[in-house]
Amino acid sequence: MAKLKVGIIGCGGIANGKHMPALAKQSHRVEMVAFCDIVEEKARQAAQKYGTPDAKVYTDYRQLLEDKSIDVVHVCTPNRSHCEITVAALEAGKHVMCEKPMAKTAADAKLMLDTAKKTGKKLTIGYQNRFRPDSLLLKKYVDRGDLGEIYYGKAHAIRRRAVPTWGVFLNEYEQGGGPLIDIGTHALDLTLWMMDNYKPKAVLGQAFKKLNNQTQTANAWGDWDPAQFTVEDSAFGFIVMENGAAISLESSWALNTLDVREAKTTLCGTRGGADMVDGLRINTVDLNRQVTIIPDLKAGGVDFYAGSGDMSPGDLETSMWIDSILNDTQPLVLPEQAYVVSQILEAIYVSAKTGEAVYFK
């Protein structure tokens, strides 16, 4: 069977940290044949490390997309260009994995979704936290009905002092925001997926720039430059869904708190609840007693999907993405779902600016 030919657009941190190493582990099914970055040396280094002997190097993604032999493109660029590149890749006949969030704006995300439908090509978004062992097991509990009707959820994306000081993370023009769109997006995706609820009714949000002007910050990656830190340092939202369910979303890169939880969810249902404190905890009532179930996520390295073994979440995400292309099945992360995440994140930012709730039609 011929291997899928993959092109990488954006050869920075997330491409080197997740996408390219994961694709390299799929070398029996894929080969990376093209690399693009506005900094040519980055693309060249990626090609030398991960590419085929004749891999091409580009600084203009449009030239890469002209190669009709490329089947799949991974978009690993700043948020602002997700839509432009993804739409062009889909229209060029490529399947696309785009790094999270789907886009800088909800309108851009909708265009990406519409283009995927129009072209018939597969599109998925890089929400790798769905592929963690605790997430996959919790989803099985939820789908089996152990929690009953889930009517309240919490999406946690809280760092105490971990502001990313590299790249364009602090640049609102490139990214669209700070911790809310960066890590809050993971927590919201996880919560909506668990609840299987993608119909928001109203959103009320608030964003803060309270710590971004401080110095001597004890930040995990060194002090940030207050002049560059123009996005929010924390943001919070309350979401009411059409069926009456509610979700609270909390996100921060810098917040004076000890309750630090990132890319985690808490769920409350009619039959039980769950959270991701120290792994995974399920709470319920049995024989008129309150019961807490703590699954052993390490025992045996449980295979939730055939061949997953001890893969990292990023590895499993890529493996299942390639499966969906080769088997013509739906990817685990659907663009319709990621679009709703973008809608809600944008509504929180709008609400924070206007001081008013945002209602969905």
Image (tube, rainbow, N blue to C red):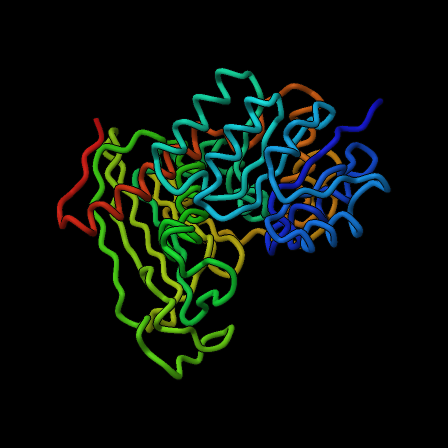
In the displayed orientation, state which residue is furthest to the bottom: 216
Residue 118: image location, x then y, percent: 49, 15
- Left/right placement of residue 287 relative to residue 247 reads right
- Left/right placement of residue 9 relative to residue 177 reads right
Q: Tell which of 9 and 4 is nearer to you.
A: 9
Image quadrant for the C terminus? top left
Residue at (26% x, 41% y) in the render: 347
Q: Quadrant of residue 26?
A: top right
Residue 226: image location, x then y, percent: 35, 73
Please tell me how many numbered marks the rendered image carries: 0
Residue 291 visible in rendering: no
Residue 3: image location, x then y, percent: 80, 28
Q: Tell which of 322 and 164 is nearer to you.
A: 164
Residue at (79% x, 44% y) in the render: 51
Image quadrant for the N terminus? top right
Residue 133, placed above or below residue 121: below
Residue 261, placed above or below residue 110: below
- Left/right placement of residue 260 relative to residue 29 reads left
